[in-house]
Image (cartoon, helix red, strand yellow):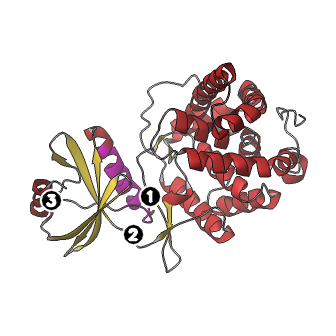
Amino acid sequence: MNEAFLVHLQQKLDCQIQGVKPRRNVLFLKTNRGNWVVKAYKDQEKAQWVTQLAHMLRENGFVHTVSYLHTADNEAVLPYGDHFYTVMKAIDGRESSYAYPYDIRKAAYTLARFHRAARHWEPALPQYPYKPPLIAKWENRMDEFVQIAERIAAKGPANRFEAMIHSIAPKVIQDGRQVLAQTSRMPLIAEMHRAIVEGTVAHRDVASHNFLLTPTGECYLIDLDTAHFDMQLADLVQFIGRLLLLQGYQPQIFSDVINIYSKLNPLDDSQIRMIFQLLRYPDNILREVTGVYYRRPGYRVRGAMQLLQLEGKYWRQRKRFLGAEHLVMGSWSSWTMDSTG
């Protein structure tokens, strides 16, 4: 630990640091003014963006997110060396789990509140996008997975993990490409255009550990690093896609989440249909496998194998869920994809 940096923090924030504990990519500090979390950024603009976003959310009534400390000069970003630091008040809460319906309900309502507050900012996108960022990300992820699968097929699986990938690759690629090919039939560009006009911000990393539940039952949405101007529907696709796996693809959980979210942030039929159809994209598998092979932070072989095993366990339930749109939605749209296969 850089002692000079800690002295710098004490001077800037007028505190006494009594303990330091590294965790993931942050530092937890115990001070005479409370418990804080310190995070470093290489990009000053990124650090300024997250602090401004948190301020905007609070101004718009969403206080269940990170709260940044300011220096005596009212600065929320502290430059030191070649990095830029932010200091947040620590939140006394546990990470949520999508294995528990209680946690899911809390997170769904919190996400709706976040979306409601994260609107009416001046859009950062200067022109009409060719395609929504979600689809561009998925196309890139599919290309990466195909390359991984082709390398494994050419050399033969070297271990159990690669054997699992080799076994599921044909079906995963088929499903993924089908969704990508048929997104042009969905009104996604119109949804993206509406997001630009309304200036909406999406979180874009609604993993369960980014929802903290306090002992008093409050739910906080943290880690705004990935948040940016985007269609908020992308958050719902990611959120529901992740929790469906841990809930064994039970149709009721989809309806519950949509109902909870819509009570505060109403969705129209077209948006709900798009969410359901985009859940066909096998993003859980593609995200984990490419994350491991491209050595992205937070991805490990053991975790990826556990996810692949879970997807295999619920493969039939997933197929039934995706084939039951007429039961979940109550009607079919003109651009509904073929549910066979």
Q: What element does badge 1 sit on? A: loop
Type of amino acid at the residue the image marks with label 3: Leu
Residue at 14% x, 54% y is 5
Q: What element does badge 2 sit on? A: loop
Q: Is residue 218 above or below residue 274?
A: below
Q: Is residue 63 above or below residue 272?
A: below
Sequence-wise, the earlier of marks 2 and 3 is 3
Characterize the magenta stretch by its predominant secondary structure: helix
Question: Mark 1 = which residue?
Answer: 222
Extent of the magenta region: 47-66
Q: CA distance from mark 2 to mark 1?
A: 9 Å
Type of amino acid at the residue the image marks with label 2: Ile
Query: Where residue 183 sits: x, y (%)?
Result: 72, 29
Residue at 64% x, 46% y is 305
Label 2 close to label 1 by CB (< 8 Å): yes
Q: Quadrant of the N terminus?
A: bottom left
Q: Residue 6, which numbered label?
A: 3
Sequence-wise, the earlier of marks 2 and 1 is 2
